[in-house]
Image (spheres, grey):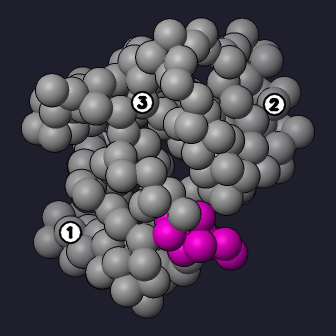
Amino acid sequence: MTRPAVFLDRDGVINENRVDHVKSWDEFAFLPGALDALRRLATLDWPVVVITNQAAIGRGLVSRETVEEINGRMVAAVRSEGGRIDGVFYCPHRPEEECACRKPEPGLLLQAAEQLGLDLPTSFLVGDAASDVLAAHAADCRAVLVGTGRGAEHAKRALLQRHDIVGYHLADDLGQAVDWIVDIAKEPSLHDRSRT
């Protein structure tokens, strides 16, 4: 039996985005309110899955082992604060490699769904960029765009409108996104509800 999940982008949603990439645990900083949001998200009893582009690996700026160590420490820190991350899937490729896993492609979501038994049409993807919204659409998930990370809410809204990207919920940050998802999760008509 499959079940809904909440997919989260990492950089710009859970932790502060860096122009030069997060290359060590010392450079990883949780965004304000992110740990509290993850603690509230854990009450849903749905899998919480991080999906993240990590082109720094393909560019030779950081090793796979280091990225996996950062992700492992993130998961442990979230757990120590009462939250939960049930899986982390990352794409190591550079954009020009045109792989099937780098967002906006849906490969990471498809891989997670297969491995964890997830129902994508009733799942959510929370991200901070147009590529996250497009990946959600490609995988038939609901998209939530947060105003943290790669720019201000208004700039993001304008960017998405310029690219004719519609069909996403806009939230100030992960906490507001979690509030919206938890409200929807309480509705008995979750499986039949149309996209926002």
Task: Answer with mark 2 or mark 1, whichever residue precedes in sequence.
Answer: 1
Gap in angstroms between the C-alphas marked 3 and 1: 25 Å
Q: Which amino acid, by three-letter code, is at mark 1?
A: Glu
Any part of residue 183 in sight: yes
Residue farthest to the right, as pictured: 154
Residue at x-position 30% and y-position 81%: 76
**SS class, disc 1:** helix
Amino acid beneath label 3: Ser
- The magenta stretch is 31-39
Q: CA distance from mark 2 to mark 3?
A: 22 Å
Mark number for residue 68? 1
Q: Is residue 9 left or right of residue 174?
A: left
Pick out the residue farthest to the left.
115
Say if the magenta span includes residue 38: yes
- The picture places residue 39, in percent across and down from the top left corner, at 50, 69
Q: Position of residue 87 (x, y in %)?
A: 24, 55
Residue beneath disc 3: 123
